[in-house]
């Protein structure tokens, strides 16, 4: 007897499977598995190919391979365990526990991934890479344009509410400068920006605002850029900003202009 319910059931199962395969957390999980498999097999070049093009253009394979071998220290990997932590905006994070000789002998690699339109690609590996692996920061003009797009959004009413729903922007926004090329006189609409060094900030007895901002390292991943902005209260424990808060921002380059795309982590 022909089952009249079978075809609709198979179609529903097929659509559900297709939807699962297209979910960002599912596709990120597959990439994390590829990373772990290459790690177990000692295929450092396969891991290198998982990185965004900007990394491969500026960091040689030999240097990456050396860092990976220094981390591994000739230890034999017995098993690995992966977990997707989150997918937010154009970014995602996964963790891999690597077990060596025994369950007590293990290490942990935290992965930052970015989806710039060609699937998930590696942006960073904690415990393997250190801060000497700087990349995605060679084009000053593009860095400044991406930074301007980030500040334009986060220093808007919509942006500031993502940091804290009761936070109100002051008439003048103070940003701590670290002397990086993306800082300085940027075209940001709506609010005048004052860039101060930490020494200049410390000399001020009274700030004309309840908080100041700290701009993190801006990095370019081809058509996608990422920036972080911290909001630091002048006096901790006082509402509405009772503690340091931060936000991660993704920008996308379209029609030769950088535009805000999405929010990543908020802390």
Image: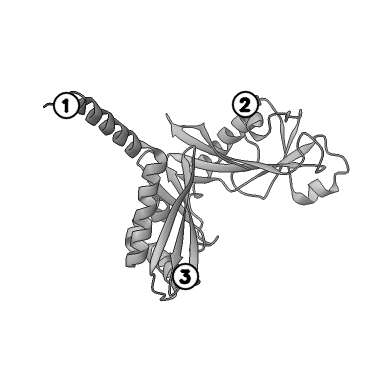
Q: Earlier in the sequence, mark 1 or mark 2?
A: 1
Q: Residue at x 61, y 30 (%)?
A: 152
Q: Position of residue 235 (x, y in %)?
A: 82, 42
Kindly report which numbered mark, 3 or 2, lies closer to the viewer in this rendering: 3
Residue 102 against residue 233 in the figure, above or below: below
Residue ID for mark 1: 3
Residue 102 image point, x, y percent: 45, 73
**Res. 116 visible in picture:** no
Q: Residues within 10 Å of mark 1 (few under 14, many from 20)?
A: few
Which residue is drawn at the image coordinates 44% and 65% (left, top)? Answer: 98
Structural distance between the alpha carbons of marks 1 and 2:
54 Å
Given the current orientation, which residue lies at the most extreme right position? 205
Q: Quadrant of residue 24?
A: top left
Q: Are the residues at dot 3 and dot 1 in contact (C-beta closer than 8 Å)?
A: no
Instruction: Indicate which disc, 3 or 1, sits on the residue closer to the N terminus.
Output: 1
Residue 160 visible from this viewpoint: yes
The residue where tag 2 is placed is 158
The part of the image, by quadrant, that contains residue 207 is top right
Label 3 sits on a secondary structure element that is loop
| Residue lying at 39% horizontally and 52% vertically, measured from the top left | 32
N-terminal of the pair, mark 3 or mark 2, is: 3
> Looking at this view, is 152 or 67 the one in front?
67
Residue highlighted by disc 3: 103
Label 3 crowd (10 A; few <14 / some 14-19 / many >=20): few
Secondary structure beneath disc 1? Answer: loop
Q: Nearer the viewer, residue 171 or 71?
A: 71
Left or right relative to 158: residue 89? left
Instruction: Give the crowd class for mark 2: few <14, some 14-19, many >=20 residues within 10 Å.
Output: few
């Amino acid at each position: 007897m022909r089952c009249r319910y079978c075809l609709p059931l198979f179609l529903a199962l097929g659509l559900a499977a297709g939807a699962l395969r297209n979910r960002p957390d599912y596709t990120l999980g597959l990439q994390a598995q590829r990373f772990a498999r290459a790690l177990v097999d000692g295929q450092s070049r396969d891991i290198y190919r998982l990185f965004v093009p900007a990394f491969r253009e500026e960091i040689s394979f030999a240097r990456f391979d050396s860092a990976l071998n220094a981390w591994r220290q000739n230890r034999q990997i017995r098993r690995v365990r992966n977990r997707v932590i989150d997918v937010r905006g154009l970014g995602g994070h996964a963790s891999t526990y690597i077990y060596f000789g025994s369950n007590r002998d293990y290490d942990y690699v935290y992965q930052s991934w970015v989806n710039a339109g060609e699937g998930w690609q590696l942006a960073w590996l904690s415990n393997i890479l250190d801060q000497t692996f700087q990349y995605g920061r060679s084009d000053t003009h593009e860095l400044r344009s991406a930074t301007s797009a980030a500040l334009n959004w986060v220093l808007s009413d919509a942006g500031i509410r993502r940091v804290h729903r009761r936070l109100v922007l002051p008439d003048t926004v103070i940003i701590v400068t670290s002397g990086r090329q993306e800082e300085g006189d940027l075209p940001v609409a709506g609010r005048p920006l004052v860039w101060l060094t930490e020494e200049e900030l410390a000399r001020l007895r009274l700030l004309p605002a309840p908080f100041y901002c700290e701009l993190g390292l801006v990095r370019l991943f081809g058509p996608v850029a990422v920036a972080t902005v911290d909001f630091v209260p002048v006096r901790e424990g006082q509402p509405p900003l009772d503690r340091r808060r931060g936000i991660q921002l993704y920008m996308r380059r379209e029609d030769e202009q950088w535009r805000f795309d999405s929010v990543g982590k908020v802390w």
